[in-house]
Image (cartoon, grey):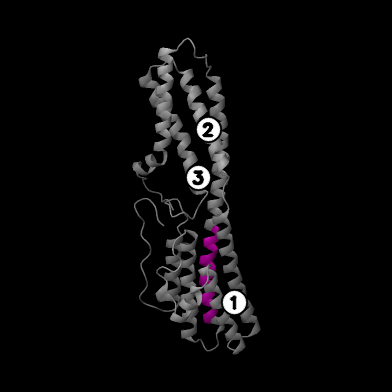
Amino acid sequence: MLLDRKISFAYIFNKVKVDLLIVLLIGLITNLLTVFFRGYLPEMPLTIPTFLGTAISILLSFKMNQSYDRWWEARKVWGAIVNDSRSFVIQLQSFLDDGDPAVIRKLAYRQIAWCYSLGQSLRGQDPVEGIGPLLSETDRTAISGHVNKPLAILQLNAGDIRNLRQSSAIDVFRHVQLDQTLVRFCDSMGKAERINGTVFPSTYRHFLHFIIYLFVVSLSISLKNVQMIFEIPLLLAISAGFFLIEKSALHLQDPFRNRPSDVSVTAIARTIDINIRQLLGEKEVPEPVKPDEFYIL
């Protein structure tokens, strides 16, 4: 997630360097055509690039709104995971009559592992990397055959909660409350997977790029009487603004791609880790994830 800090110029430039190179070539070619074929180029009134620029602004505004909605929905999903994870451990401590710390710790550690595993799975990373110490050997064996590792971890906790009910460690009402919390975990996972698996129409981006390049061509022809030393920087500056907004929207629409603009699922999972360990009364807890310059993952 991008932080409220000074963003590196290299990060910004790398987003649009290819597009700006194309704009530069368009500007140079148009100027060369102006020099050698001035009489053949049409008169391009400024109203045409003005109209195209207005259309581009509307399209970019729509795309940015849609992309941010996806990003914000993903952030709300992980906010719900934070709240439910804390509630889950507090419920276990409150509902178990004997307060068996070993059982509570096992279920709580699985919940921590689930958070890390879900974040890594959404980003296309190894879902079990780093969570080995949080699970027993039996648990690791049980989830090894599953494609969806986070779902398998939830199943393990559901099984143990069922065993607690069968052994009368919890009554029916408490069983239902814990089961509802597990259902919310499953719902949140499904929402995150839906966002991650739903592709924003790529044709929209291609059409938008085409219109921006068309705008650059028409503006370059309209400014054919302006000296190249002034025209080229103007084309680059205007098109850079359009492309930067488009790239920002492109990255926001996919909030689980292990990019600086991602929802910070690793940092959120670490926060849950710290909170749960402290609820368990542990003194040694991991450090929060530290920002990397202008963003945090």
- Residue type at numbered disc 1: Leu
Q: Which residue is mark 2?
A: 210
The location of residue 81, given as percent across then percent down, is 53, 65
Task: Tell me the tag on residue 288.
Answer: none
Tag 3's secondary structure?
A: helix
Residue 62: name its quadrant: top right
Which residue is at the far front? 145
Foreground of the two, 261 or 147: 147
Residue at x 40%, y 76% (from the top left corner): 133
Question: Residue 227's spot in the image, x, y percent?
Answer: 38, 17
Left or right: 191 as drawn, with respect to 10: right
**In the image, is residue 22 above or below residue 266?**
above
Say whether disc 3 or disc 2 marks the residue closer to the N-terminus: 2
Query: Real-space Cα distance between discs 3 and 2?
Result: 16 Å
Looking at the image, is 260 positioned above or below residue 28?
A: below
> What residue is rendered at 35% in x and 41% in y?
9
Secondary element at image label 1: helix
Tag 3: residue type? Answer: Leu
- Classify residue 273 by image quadrant: bottom left
Taking the image as shown, residue 134 lies to the left or right of residue 194, namely left
Question: Which numbered mark, 1 or 3, is in the foreground of this view?
Answer: 3
Q: Is residue 136 magenta?
A: no
- Disc ID at residue 178: 1
Amino acid at the residue labelled 2: Phe
Q: Mark 1 and mark 3: span between their CA atoms?
A: 39 Å
Q: Identify residue for label 3.
A: 250
Extent of the magenta region: 76-93
